[in-house]
Image (cartoon, grey):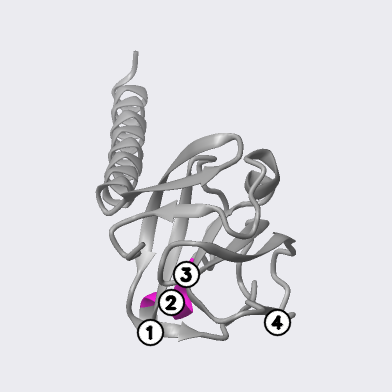
Amino acid sequence: MSEATRRSTVLWAARLALCAGVLMVAQATSDAGAESLEIVTATGPHQFQIEVARTDRERQTGLMNRRSMPQDHGMLFLFPAEQPISMWMKNTYIALDMIFVSRKGRVTGVAQDAVPMSEAIIPSGPPAYAVIELNAGAARAMGLAVGDQVRHPSFKP
């Protein structure tokens, strides 16, 4: 093997290792901030790992600009009080289900299959304290209905 070929191979291997390391750190960082959330429906308990958006900035950014999300992951948006909530899908590439939840952790409404990149407003209907965003189809798969229980330390049953 020539010296130039060897250097090129070493450089290529180093780049691959660096990329793999960056991906591992990114995954570990996103999982490190995840919290457990359980949704109890007629079909039983369903576990999710969620990121929590507590600040205005976190709520404004949400899942924007992400291209994928594991099936058992999601995002919980917490608001200061129960109120009518409006969401949208601007700059969101992932089709989502939006689950509106009361302060007591009861599902108050569900918007299934929100259209990626849409600026259409998705209203909560009744006032809600939180919104859970999951991959589209999750609500249907677990048989989610208004009145179902959400378990997370943010809710006070």
Q: Is residue 18 above or below residue 34?
A: above
Name the residue that disc number 1 marks: 56
The amino acid type found where label 4 is placed reads Ile
Q: Are marks 2 and 3 in contact (CB under 8 Å)?
A: yes
Q: Residues within 10 Å of mark 4 (few under 14, many from 20)?
A: few
Q: Are marks 2 and 1 in contact (CB under 8 Å)?
A: yes
The mark found on residue 121 in the picture is 4
Identity of the residue drawn at 31% across and 34% down: 11
From which residue to which does the magenta span run? Answer: 58-62
Q: Residues within 10 Å of mark 2 (few under 14, many from 20)?
A: some
Name the residue that disc number 2 marks: 59
Along the line of sight, the residue nearer the viewer: 123 or 121: 123
Q: Are marks 2 and 4 in contact (CB under 8 Å)?
A: no
Q: For mark 4, give the secondary structure.
A: loop
Query: x%, y% of residue 63?
Result: 50, 64
Q: Is residue 49 magenta?
A: no
Q: Is residue 116 above or below residue 17?
A: below
Query: x%, y% of residue 41?
Result: 57, 43
Residue at mark 3 to residue at mark 4: CA–CA distance? 15 Å
First reached walking from the N terminus: tag 3 or tag 4: 3
Q: Residues within 10 Å of mark 3 (few under 14, many from 20)?
A: many
Residue at mark 2 to residue at mark 4: CA–CA distance? 15 Å
Identity of the residue drawn at 67% across and 51% down: 136
Q: For mark 1, give the secondary structure.
A: helix
Name the residue that disc number 3 marks: 62
Identity of the residue drawn at 49% across and 40% down: 72
> In the image, 102: left or right of 147?
left
